[in-house]
Image (cartoon, rainbow, N blue to C red):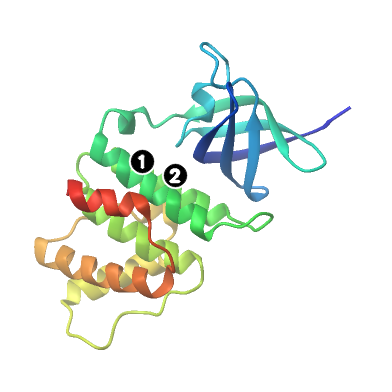
């Protein structure tokens, strides 16, 4: 008999396997980043078809094989359907998922990263928050969650409001991150800092980020 486990998490990406199956990358609260197979998920009408799309967040019942996991059931609480009808917003979300994939490791405690990803996708769905601001907050907080945040830059003069925003992003709980907006001047400075820190601490080129540059 296979051994079943239940995990709470979000689909970061999915890859077609064979004619009808999918392999998913799942960021979980209990086991960090794991890969799993979803048998028949590409068949029309299959119960796992929607549940194994990127951004799907919920509870997944898996059985653990000798070398891999297989999805048995899924109870999805949020599909983030708003992003499916927002081309630009979807690519921001894909970029956030790519960053989470970059940072996450199997069997690590990735609860803060999972919360950050979830709250950031929610923020992308909020019309009052501009996507570029959400991106800056996500990038700076992801670096902080990974324990690499170097503090407020001291090699340039920044607006006092920019310094406050950077400090707030680094120190605030994830649940309180997306509760403010900034002026255009502060947003420009936040973009500069986030870009510099991303290049410094994220040793990878993200395909979705390159696409975003052509959209924004």
Furthest-left residue in this view: 184
Describe the element under mark 1 as helix, strand or loop.
Answer: helix
Q: Are marks 2 and 1 in contact (CB under 8 Å)?
A: yes
x and y percentages locating residue 173 in the rendered image: 44, 59
Q: Nearer the viewer, residue 212 or 21?
A: 21
Furthest-right residue in this view: 1
User: How many angstroms separate mark 2 from mark 1 (CA)?
Assistant: 6 Å
Check disc 2 and report the residue beneath it: 118
Residue at 31% x, 30% y: name it: 82
**In this picture, residue 182 sits left or right of residue 68:** left
**In this picture, residue 179 sits left or right of residue 75:** left
Q: Which label sits on residue 122?
A: 1
Q: Quadrant of residue 152?
A: bottom left
Q: Nearer the viewer, residue 59 or 87?
A: 87
Q: Quadrant of residue 109?
A: bottom right
x and y percentages locating residue 212 in the rendered image: 25, 49
Q: Quadrant of the N terminus?
A: top right
Residue at 42% x, 72% y: name it: 201
Dot 1 surroundings within 10 Å: few (below 14), some, or many (20 or more)?
Answer: some
x and y percentages locating residue 22 in the rendered image: 58, 30
Furthest-front residue in this view: 18
Q: Nearer the viewer, residue 52 or 124?
A: 52
Q: Which label sits on residue 201?
A: none
Dot 2 surroundings within 10 Å: few (below 14), some, or many (20 or more)?
Answer: many
């Amino acid at each position: 008999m296979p051994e079943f486990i239940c995990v709470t998490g979000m689909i970061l990406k999915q890859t077609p396997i064979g004619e009808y199956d999918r392999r998913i990358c799942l960021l979980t609260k209990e086991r960090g980043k794991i890969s799993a197979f979803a048998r028949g998920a590409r068949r029309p009408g299959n119960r796992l078809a929607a549940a194994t799309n990127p951004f799907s967040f919920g509870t997944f019942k898996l059985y653990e094989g000798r070398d891999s996991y297989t999805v048995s059931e899924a109870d999805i609480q949020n599909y983030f359907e708003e992003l499916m009808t927002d081309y630009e917003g979807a690519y921001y979300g894909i970029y956030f998922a790519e960053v989470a994939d970059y940072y996450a490791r199997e069997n690590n405690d990735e609860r803060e990263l999972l919360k950050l990803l979830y709250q950031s996708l929610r923020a992308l769905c909020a019309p009052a928050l501009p996507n570029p601001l959400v991106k800056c907050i996500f990038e700076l907080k992801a670096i902080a969650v990974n324990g690499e945040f170097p503090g407020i830059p001291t090699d340039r003069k920044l607006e006092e409001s920019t310094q406050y925003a950077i400090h707030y992003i680094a120190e605030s709980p994830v649940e309180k991150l997306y509760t403010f907006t900034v002026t255009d001047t502060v947003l420009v400075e936040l973009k500069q800092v986030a870009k510099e820190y991303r290049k410094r601490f994220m040793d990878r080129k993200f395909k979705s980020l390159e696409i975003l540059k052509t959209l924004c």
